[in-house]
Image: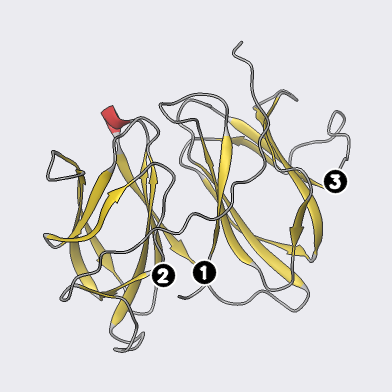
């Protein structure tokens, strides 16, 4: 079996935005009653850099693997979203999405390039109860297969524990898990085993944090596996 390298969650990588007038805006001055809000993540490990278009207009350009944007304000209703190879190349994703006013979405360019597909998640930016954090886990590593997830105190022995999430499939997401403020360790193992593919190490979760962690793989695909941590907050 291919060896697996443990990595901590990567730091946030904030993508520079190339916003255009029209379908998208870099503020929410029209108010949540008129706009939806979309964040874009490049999570296709063997895909080239890409441009993102909304209704035919480039809103993000030259996006690298594992880069992601802040939330883009988009008028509510039906929109066409295309992902093209950067610099005017072939279209690899062409999807029509219906965006509701006041909602926040994460659109992930997911899977290997040969079968790349949009994975669109609805984000919940409501604050957790006092003293809690909210974390959502997303399986975005197509080569990893089914996995189990353990959320424990740092250093806890998982050898005799049942996973908190079992048989978690590619493109599955947990929904937001509410956890009391504190320090945790998240380990992702190959399903039915204790073979760790991702280990966050000690992970502090402050009160009020809302975040999404996406399991991803190495550039080009395969191990070592790691995760992107995105804070789910309004710009």
Name the residue carrying label 2.
104
Q: How is the image coloured?
A: secondary structure
When asked about the image quadrant of residue 79, the answer is bottom left
Residue under the point 30% across and 36% down? 116
At which x and y percent is residue 174? 58, 51
Mark 1: few, some, or many residues within 10 Å (few <14, many ≥20)? Answer: some
Q: Of 107 and 70, which appears nearest the observer?
A: 70
Q: Is residue 102 above or below residue 191?
A: below
At which x and y percent is residue 129? 71, 77
At which x and y percent is residue 219? 44, 31
* Residue contact between numbered discs 3 and 1, judged by CB atoms under 8 Å: no
Residue under the point 53% across and 27% down? 144
Q: Earlier in the sequence, mark 3 or mark 1?
A: 1
Q: Earlier in the sequence, mark 3 or mark 2?
A: 2
- The quadrant of the image that shows the C terminus is bottom left
Label 2 residue SS: strand
Residue under the point 85% across and 48% down? 153
Name the residue carrying label 1.
124
Q: How many marks?
A: 3
* Residue contact between numbered discs 2 and 1, judged by CB atoms under 8 Å: yes
Name the residue carrying label 3.
154
């Amino acid at each position: 079996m291919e060896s697996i390298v443990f990595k901590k969650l990567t730091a946030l990588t904030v993508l520079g935005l190339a916003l255009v007038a029209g379908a998208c805006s870099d503020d929410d001055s029209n108010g949540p009653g008129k706009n939806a809000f979309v964040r874009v993540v490049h999570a296709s490990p063997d895909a080239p850099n890409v441009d993102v278009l909304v209704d035919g207009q480039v809103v993000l350009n030259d996006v690298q693997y594992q880069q992601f944007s802040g939330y883009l304000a988009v008028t509510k209703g039906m929109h066409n979203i295309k992902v093209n190879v950067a610099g005017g190349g072939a279209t690899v994703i062409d999807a029509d999405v219906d965006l509701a006013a006041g909602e926040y979405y994460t659109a992930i360019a997911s899977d290997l390039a040969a079968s790349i597909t949009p994975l669109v998640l609805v984000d919940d930016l409501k604050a957790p109860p006092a003293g809690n954090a909210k974390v959502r886990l997303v399986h975005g590593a197509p080569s990893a297969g089914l996995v189990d997830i353990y959320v424990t105190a740092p250093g806890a022995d998982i050898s005799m524990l049942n996973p908190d999430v079992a048989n978690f499939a590619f493109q599955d997401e947990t929904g937001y898990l509410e956890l009391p403020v504190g320090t945790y360790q998240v380990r992702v193992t190959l399903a039915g085993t204790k073979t760790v593919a991702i280990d966050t190490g000690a992970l502090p979760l402050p009160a009020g944090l809302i975040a999404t962690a996406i399991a991803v793989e190495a550039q080009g695909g395969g191990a070592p596996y790691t995760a992107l941590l995105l804070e789910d907050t309004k710009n």
